[in-house]
Amino acid sequence: MSAFAATYIDAAGRRRSGRFEATSTEQVLLLLRSKAVWPVSVRQLKPNRRHAGLTIPPGEFVPFLHQFELQVRAGVTADVALAQLAEDTPPGNLRILLDHIHGHVAQGRPIHEACRYFHRQFPPHLAAVIAAGEASAQLPEALRALAVHLTGVEELRRTTRRALIYPLLVLSATTGLIAFLLGGVVPQFSEVFTSLSLKLPLLTIVLIDASTWVRGAWPVLLAGGVVGFLGLVGAARSEKLRAVRDRLFMHVPILGETVRLLATARFSAHCRLLHDAGVPLLDALKTGAELTGHSVLADQLRHARNAVAMGKPLHQALPKNHAFPSFVVPALRAGETTGQLGTALHHIEDYATRRARDRLATALTFLEPTILGLLATVVGAIALSFFLPLLSLLGGINAR
């Protein structure tokens, strides 16, 4: 439905205007004539997309799904439940979302159509689950499945973020310390050594030359860092460059396996959510491929989808040398053989998530001492380059 602005003459002969929701101009004209008024003009309004991109944090959105599910399960109609939830919600993005959805549902529109307006909060796969729940009269089950799915996705995201915080902090601190030593401390010692006319060891000479180069080239280094960062961001938006990146990452020890496991968990989670909601398998595979976040696995899933469309079971449709973890095909075979594909996908999701967490823990076990060793080596080398000339000076004084 779209919004229309209409000007009309009422029964008293007064000129009035109003806003109407309809599918076409003809429907607005019929509506006005049914009210015994004379239409003057009708024009379609441009959709107001000001709030279409808003997002709700999972900590607020998941409780809303649970509350909506409980009310619908208790027999409360969707429009009444949404009105009550909107009334109980404090002002904010969630209140805006609920008011919008309730307004459209109260006019007779399906819930999933009203939700699709908020394209970032309700991407196609989430709206498809709600649509399937409405079509099958299992909306409470669909809402519960969405809440569980979003909770799992957020937990996996938090785990990944926590795993990356410590290494990033240590690397940032190490980079800052090295920059401070090379830019501020080494030049002062260099002046002292020059004034004493000491014969400097090779390590000290290399350090002083590096300090001189960094102080002279820091604008170039800074610009290069900015360009490199922007290049990485741009590369992430290019399908070809993403494919090259993903193929390279697959051969990196520990990291490559972790990325594959996370992509497998994302695919199985989204595919299971859609499959359990009653969405056809071909559509579920298409959406699952788009949401893996891994171009290599996504391409293999698209090829598998084509084979499934020709009648092959999914576990046979995957390429022979596929990049998925080895446990995926046996789990799919068992699920398809027993008619429990949703359960098999759930098993794959759980197992891949656990394995990914174990890999992250293993990576951190090796990464932490490696970073600390690198920091100790760099700082130790800089300190040694300071002390070697001083020891040489003290040795010369004692010799005299």
Image (tube, rainbow, N blue to C red):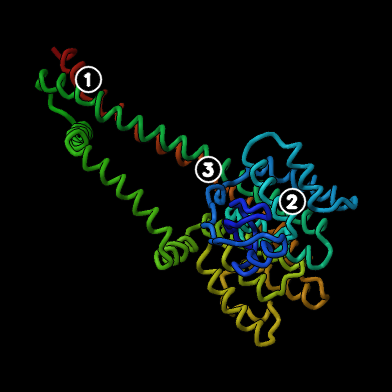
Task: Classify residue 343 as left or right of residue 173.
Answer: right
The correct choice, above or below, for 355 with respect to 91 in the image is: below
Residue 263 quadrant: bottom right
Q: Which residue, as the protein is rendered here, is positioned at the far front?
A: 13
Q: What residue do we see at 69% from left, 55% from top? A: 104
Task: Classify residue 198 as left or right of residue 100.
Answer: left
Can you give x and y, in whole percent of width and height, for residue 93 in the image? Answer: 62, 41
Q: What residue do we see at 35% from left, 29% from top? A: 177
Q: CA distance from mark 2 to mark 1?
A: 66 Å
Q: Earlier in the sequence, mark 2 or mark 1?
A: 2
Residue, disc 2: 147
Residue 390: numbered disc: 1
The correct choice, above or below, for 268 with respect to 80 in the image is: below
Question: Which circle, 2 or 1, is nearer the viewer?
Answer: 2
Residue 155: numbered disc: none
Residue, disc 3: 164
Q: Earlier in the sequence, mark 3 or mark 1?
A: 3
Can you give x and y, in whole percent of width and height, for residue 179 in the image? Answer: 30, 32
Front-most of 218 and 120? 120
Q: Earlier in the sequence, mark 3 or mark 2?
A: 2
Helix, strand or loop for disc 3: helix
Helix, strand or loop for disc 2: helix
Q: What residue do we see at 40% from left, 63% from top? A: 238
Question: Which circle, 3 or 2, is nearer the viewer?
Answer: 2
Residue 267 quadrant: bottom right
Can you give x and y, in whole percent of width and height, for residue 297 in the image? Answer: 55, 69
Cβ–Cβ below 8 Å for labels 3 and 2? no
Q: Amino acid at mark 3?
A: Leu
Front-most of 392 and 354? 354
Question: Which circle, 3 or 1, is nearer the viewer?
Answer: 3
Q: Amino acid at mark 1?
A: Leu
Residue 330 in sight in this render: yes
